[in-house]
Image (cartoon, helix red, strand yellow):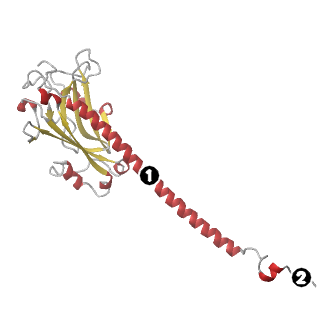
Amino acid sequence: MSLKPSYLLRYPNANRGFTLIEILVATSILMVLTFVLLSISGHAGQIWQTGEEGNQHRQRARMALNFLERELSGAMLPIVRTSQNSLQFVINNDVSNNDQTGPDEIFFQAPVADDVSKGKEAAIGYFVAWNGRQSSLYRIYLGASDTRYDEADPVAATADITGGQREEFLFLENVLGLWVTAYNAAGTPVVNWDSRDEQALPVMVKVDLLLIDAKYAQRMNGPLAFTHEAISDSESMLEELPAMIRPGVRLVSMNVRLDHALRGTVPVSSP
């Protein structure tokens, strides 16, 4: 006569192992849970990466705006303010490619030349243009020592910007539009400011940039089509953007006070 241990009397199935079906069910549940956890972590990683790319682009945009602000605040006029033979302070002088989205361009001189052997002044220009599927902000910089700098018409010397030399002037990628509004001493906005007509620098300039994150920029196949009214101001264009890219677009703005407009214009070049 054999005696069974007391625990076997209480638990008669204690020595029974797992059946194949139980193992398969447990494995399936584990696989489902693993898949769910990986999906959650992958999605979280994508969100983090997208947010990080957006933060980096915003940081680069802020640095670009600060750089633009320093140059723009030092804008000067030539001795003869009506001269056609030297660069004045001009907004919306249409010398860049006509495929741009943001309608505004700004050109001026400022004492920011790297090489001062032939003077401190440099021809500066900012505008937005498309290059293939990408829209970017371009910065023209031509110091007086640059062989392309032509005192008689510094803006025309940048014509190669439309002839395949854009990479040299690339300033900030993924910019859909640039809007520049000048304000006179009375605080009144003036469209298409030209210092040859105004006989002065604007007291303040408002700059708007429409930025798009790289992830959403990849969804575009080329220049976006807008009516003239849709791009007349940054907010109108923002509302007219296609729904597929609108979540990735943001508007940044800044107001720049021109130093020499506040304390009197200082000439930088002869007529």
Q: Which residue is mark 1?
A: 48
Res 162 visible: no
Displayed quadrant of residue 35: bottom right
Between marks 2 and 1, how big is the CA–CA gap?
65 Å
User: In the image, is 197 to the left or to the right of 172?
Assistant: left
Element under label 2? loop
Can you tell which mark lies on residue 151? none
Where is 14 relative to 152, above or below? below
Q: Residue at x 18, y 28 (%)?
A: 75
Q: Return the x and y of residue 156 as percentages of the image width and height.
A: 18, 28
**Local crowd at mark 2 within 10 Å, few (<14), some, or many (≥20)?**
few
- Between disc 2 and disc 1, the foreground one is 2
At which x and y percent is residue 241? 25, 54
The residue type indicated by label 2 comes to Leu
Give how far across and how far down residue 111 sits, in percent. 22, 23
Q: Is residue 126 above or below residue 151?
A: below
Q: Mark 2 = which residue?
A: 3
Q: Quadrant of the N terminus?
A: bottom right
Residue in front for this viewpoint, 135 or 29: 29
Q: Is residue 53 visible?
A: yes
